[in-house]
Image (cartoon, rainbow, N blue to C red):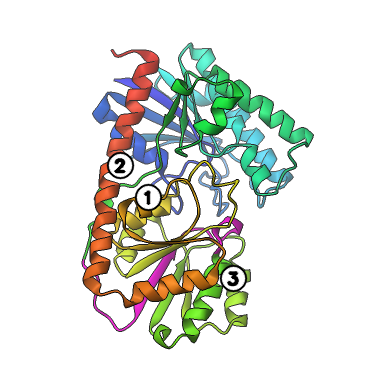
């Protein structure tokens, strides 16, 4: 069986909060002739949790047959100098031969961004072992930072990141993208389109056993995930104020499950708006999401109105979790792809328009139960066809085979 190393600085093991893309892909790769080792930082990205004991520099840990190599990472918060120190530390640790001695020798190496230094380290390792390098692009750095207003287009950092980005694209045997139209960004940089392969985020379908909605007096709307600047939850709160003031909105409840840098401000905003129809809840391990999702009548997703940021599409984990739970979703988003709309599995409105979002919430709550059930089933069918991790692992294995040749 051929073996691939996946360098993902922020890889998440099963059981914790956050996405488990590479664990899920690695679980199913053996069905297609491949196995994988994941090389990650010991510092959990959002929480800062340290996975290693004080005396440990690294640990090789197995999760359901998937090896994770945890490399000691420094603590950090926010996006300042200490986070950059953490990135550089991970990169150096990943390149030390003695740190990798417990792993099976690779037949290919995948370097996965969020930040490009992990991909750069992956390219160095692929060259060391004389195997193909694949560049997985989860965020288009620096373009994402520029589109979000965090970085100037003409800054020296932008120019340096663009140079590294283009170099990684050119040297990669294949470029794996999560956004369906990322090729529209990459190809004009002089990269052949046939090097680019779209492998979306997805969902472990077996974790979600669709259950009929539980009859109750309150219509429960639910949100799982980060409470950050890109999530647009302030607009959801404004929409819930409109819902609360509507005569038909008295029995609609929104449960916000998760954490993030803006959560204290959102709690304060809810108090300022006098919202009695909101419940803030702590984040839960990913394994608990299917159980909680079954308590929802519908889900909500809201993003910022940033057409430049979303012009290459979206691939949010929560979209596929919601669809797998066989519940309809109200999504406030304007992007080239919309799995909810493609499946006819919910309602779509424009982002940052609380009045339209409130109207969609009220419309969803008014729908007969059997119509909402039909929407949820349509969403589940669509995600089964295109976004299950067993299917996506097959696409990744085919991509790897095309680089190294079949055994």
Tell me the residue that label 2 is attached to: 386
Residue 171: quarter of image: top right
Tell me the residue that label 3 is attached to: 266
Look at the numbered disc 3 and give the secondary structure of its residue. Answer: helix
Looking at marks 2 and 3 on the same chain, the residue that comes earlier in the sequence is marked by 3
Residue 93 shows in this picture: yes
Does the magenta portion include 219? yes
Determine crowd level at label 3: few under 14, some 14-19, many 20+ residues with C-alpha closer than 10 A.
some
Q: Which of 338 and 104 is in front in this view?
A: 338
The disc placed on residue 249 is none
Measuring from the top left, give residue 231's x and y in whole percent: 54, 59
Q: Which range of residues does the magenta coloring cover? A: 212-232
Q: Residue at x 48, y 69 (%)?
A: 357
Measuring from the top left, give residue 36's x and y in whole percent: 37, 29
Closer to the observer: label 1 or label 3?
1
Q: Which of 330 and 204 is in front in this view?
A: 330
Quadrant of the drawing holding the C terminus = top left
Look at the numbered disc 1 and give the secondary structure of its residue. Answer: helix
Quadrant of the drawing holding the N terminus = top left
Measuring from the top left, give residue 131's x and y in whole percent: 45, 14
Measure how far apart labels 1 and 2 are at the Cα level. Answer: 10 Å
Measuring from the top left, give residue 318's x and y in whole percent: 41, 54
Residue 353: quarter of image: bottom right
Measure how far apart labels 2 and 3 are at the Cα level. Answer: 35 Å
The disc placed on residue 339 is 1
Look at the numbered disc 2 and give the secondary structure of its residue. Answer: helix
Looking at marks 1 and 2 on the same chain, the residue that comes earlier in the sequence is marked by 1
Residue 208 shows in this picture: no
Q: Residue at x 31, y 56 (%)?
A: 344
Residue reaching furthest to the bottom:
247
């Amino acid at each position: 069986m051929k073996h691939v190393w996946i360098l993902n600085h922020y890889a998440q093991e099963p059981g914790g909060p956050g996405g488990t893309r590479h664990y899920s892909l690695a679980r199913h790769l053996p069905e297609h002739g491949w196995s994988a080792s994941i090389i990650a930082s010991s510092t959990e990205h959002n929480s800062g949790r340290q996975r290693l004991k004080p005396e440990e520099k690294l640990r090789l840990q197995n999760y359901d047959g998937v090896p994770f190599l945890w490399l000691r990472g420094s603590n950090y918060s926010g996006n300042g100098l200490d986070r950059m120190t953490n990135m550089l530390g991970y990169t150096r640790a990943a390149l030390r031969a003695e740190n990798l001695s417990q792993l099976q020798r690779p037949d290919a190496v995948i370097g996965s961004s969020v930040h490009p230094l992990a991909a750069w380290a992956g390219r160095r390792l692929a060259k060391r072992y004389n195997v193909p390098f694949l560049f997985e692009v989860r965020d288009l750095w620096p373009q994402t930072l520029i589109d979000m207003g965090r970085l100037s287009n003409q800054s020296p950092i932008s120019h340096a990141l663009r140079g590294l980005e283009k170099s990684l694209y050119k040297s990669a045997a294949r470029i794996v993208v999560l956004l369906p139209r990322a090729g529209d960004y990459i190809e004009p940089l002089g990269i052949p389109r046939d090097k680019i392969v779209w492998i979306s985020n997805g969902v472990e379908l077996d974790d979600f056993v669709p259950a009929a909605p539980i009859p109750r007096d309150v219509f429960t709307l639910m949100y799982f995930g980060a409470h950050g600047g890109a999530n647009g939850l302030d607009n959801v709160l404004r929409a819930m104020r409109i819902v609360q003031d509507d005569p038909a909105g008295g029995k609609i409840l929104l449960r916000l499950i998760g954490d993030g840098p803006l959560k204290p401000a959102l709690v304060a905003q809810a108090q300022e708006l006098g919202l009695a129809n909101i419940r803030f809840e702590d984040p839960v391990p990913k394994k608990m999401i299917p159980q909680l999702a079954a308590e929802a009548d519908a889900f909500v997703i809201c993003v910022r109105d940033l057409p430049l940021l979303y012009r290459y599409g979206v691939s949010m984990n929560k979209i596929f979790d919601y669809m797998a739970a066989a519940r309809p979703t109200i999504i406030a988003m304007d992007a080239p792809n919309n799995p909810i709309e493609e499946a006819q599995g919910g309602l779509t409105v424009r982002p940052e328009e609380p009045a339209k979002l409130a109207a969609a919430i009220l419309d969803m709550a008014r729908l007969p139960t059997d119509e909402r059930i039909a929407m949820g089933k349509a969403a589940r069918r669509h995600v089964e066809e295109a976004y299950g991790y067993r299917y996506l692992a097959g696409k990744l294995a085919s991509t790897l085979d095309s680089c190294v040749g079949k055994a």
